[in-house]
Image (spheres, grey):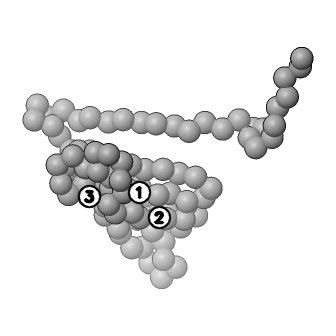
Amino acid sequence: MKGDRVEALVDTGQGVQAFEIVATRAGRRIEVVTSRGVVEVREVTRTGQPVRTGRFMTTRLIALVEHPALDERGRVEVTTRHRLQTSDAGRRVETPK
């Protein structure tokens, strides 16, 4: 939703640097995906096409703060999706016949 923004504070080794990704137009939203030691923050269109992307190593990421925008009624719309993996991810499991 327009107005959504995410702030990322990253340790650069010589201090802390702040990055901000904002949904700049109507119909755009911010998605945050974490996988394999990398946090990816994307601004995407209604159809899911990425417009802007920021990738941060989790070992260097100090804080990731999401600021959802308020709708017309003053409420916040938040959607959370989790990708679950089992401990035997990547292994083929055969079913008995």
Find out whether the residues at labels 1 and 2 contact each other: C-beta distance under 8 Å: yes
Around disc 1, counting alpha carbons within 10 Å, would you say few (fewer than 14), some (14 to 19), or many (20 or more)? many
Q: Is residue 86 left or right of residue 66?
A: right
Q: Nearer the viewer, residue 63 or 91?
A: 91
Q: Amino acid at mark 2?
A: Arg
Residue 6 seen in render:
no
The answer to which of marks 1 and 3 sits earlier in the sequence is 3
Q: Position of residue 17 (x, y in %)?
A: 39, 73
The answer to which of marks 2 and 3 sits earlier in the sequence is 3
Q: Amino acid at mark 1?
A: Val
Residue 71 seen in render:
yes
Q: Is residue 97 left or right of residue 67?
A: right
In the figure, residue 59 lies in which quadrant? bottom right
Is disc 2 placed on a helix, strand or loop?
A: strand
Q: Amino acid at mark 3?
A: Val
Residue found at x 36% / y 35%: 79
Q: Nearer the viewer, residue 92 or 77?
A: 92
State the separation of the CA atoms marked 2 and 3. 14 Å
Around disc 2, counting alpha carbons within 10 Å, would you say few (fewer than 14), some (14 to 19), or many (20 or more)? some
Furthest residue in direction front, as rendered: 97
Q: Which residue is mark 2?
A: 55
Find out whether the residues at labels 2 and 3 contact each other: C-beta distance under 8 Å: no
Is disc 3 placed on a helix, strand or loop?
A: strand
Q: Which residue is mark 3?
A: 22
Quarter of the image containing the N terminus?
top left
Q: Which residue is mark 1?
A: 41
Q: Nearer the viewer, residue 95 or 53?
A: 95
Around disc 3, counting alpha carbons within 10 Å, would you say few (fewer than 14), some (14 to 19), or many (20 or more)? many
